[in-house]
Amino acid sequence: MTTKTKTTWRKVKLGEVGRVVTGKTPPTAEKEYFDGDFPFITPTDITDFNIRYNYSTERFLSKKWFSRAKNLLIPKNSICFVCIGSTIGKICLVKEDSFTNQQINTVVVDPLKADFRYIYYLLRNNQGNIIKEYGGSGVAKPIINKSTFENIEFLIPHDVKEQKRIAEALSVFDDKVELNNKINQNLEAMAQAIFKEWLSKNQKSKIKNQKIWKVSKIGDLVEIISGYPFSSRLYNKKGLGVVTIKNVQDGNFITTCDSFISEETIPKNINPECRIRDEDILLSLTGNVGRVCFVYGGEYLLNQRVAKLKPKNERNRAFCYFLFRQGAMQNQLINMAKGSAQPNLSPVETGEIMFTIPPRETLDRFNEIVGPIYKRLIQIKKENQKLASLRDLLLPKLMSGEARV
């Protein structure tokens, strides 16, 4: 934590700036506790570290659970911090009244004692130190219990107004990132609508226009390349990031990697296609199969159980991306997946899927319209990465008092 003392700063325990709530999972056998209106946040729901409200959950709890556990309800703008296991240190702000499971400690900040955005940035800035000092570094299952979490000490500005000024300076970057994300969502929705309308319209008129639509394998359109089975002995703290299944979210690439491999230790027999770069398209093959995203932010290495979708014709890149982003395609991939422990998708079988491929003229016209949208999506993601880097460069300076606003 910060050790620099200032007359205008004070030392506080985390529990002194608000209320700390440890979540709880309802009994899974009690079905009436589920399928309600209250989001239920778990560590796996927290994904992208480049935004503040960086989670997405498909599970919701009912009013009956609220009646039983209303003291565990956390309001909007509370700060969730994962305090156990391999994902310890994940953090997010809450969008609306929600519940969490027992792996998350949440700070409900008292506005008279601190600014919630400042405490969020404070925890972000100290993630590594918190895990190292309080999480039992090196143990099999690190954990920060509620009592320990409440008693973590920080130096913060005594004046809440100064906290707000610091938080506002950092929020400028996050506000722009979140605006960009909304633009991307709208662009993707537009491209998806064009895809559906274009193919539906052209399929209905293909006989009339005397165009031959070829029924062929997906593999004739795109090459499905599996990642490389890297040995964990190659992993380092520096080098190229290794992209695994958790980096591939539904339409979102997570640039943060847990493992790295230095250039000099990359296996000689690796397929050159396993070096992935901006605009490459990825497909998840294990667990949540069928997820698709594009790569941005530099060069990475592709690990096994993730595939790269390489268009046979580069002009079809946008078409291939939005084809695999279609809900119908994703459902087909999910239904194809095999495995008792967890679903596994075969690249070979995926390539065998039959699909009615439009004629070259139609593909070219589609890509003329949607290709620029695809490139714009990537450009915005790269801009967000730069904004996040600038914010993270400024973050420790403001949190320590080295820089003032």
Image (tube, rainbow, N blue to C red):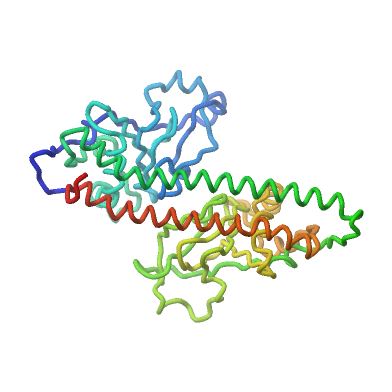
Say if residue 112 shows up in the picture: yes
Image location of residue 28, percent across then percent down:
52, 31
Task: Please state if 333 lies on the left or on the right of 397 as rendered.
Answer: right
Q: Which residue is depicted at the point 51% across and 38% down?
A: 57
| Residue 145, above or below 317 | above
Image location of residue 310, percent across then percent down:
63, 67
Image location of residue 231, percent across then percent down:
46, 70
- Residues 202 and 289: in front is 202
Q: Which residue is depicted at the point 56% across and 49% down?
A: 250
| Residue 388, above or below 61 | below
Q: Residue furthest top?
A: 67
Quadrant hosting residue 163: top left
Say if residue 285 shows up in the picture: no
Q: Which residue is depicted at the point 57% across and 64% down?
A: 280
Quadrant hosting residue 286: bottom right
| Residue 259, above or below 184 | below
- Residues 33 and 319: in front is 319
Count the marks: 0
Q: Quadrant of the C terminus?
A: top left
- Residues 5 and 382: in front is 382
| Residue 29, above or below 378 | above
Image location of residue 366, percent across then percent down:
72, 57
Q: Residue furthest bottom?
A: 268
- Residues 127 and 101: in front is 127
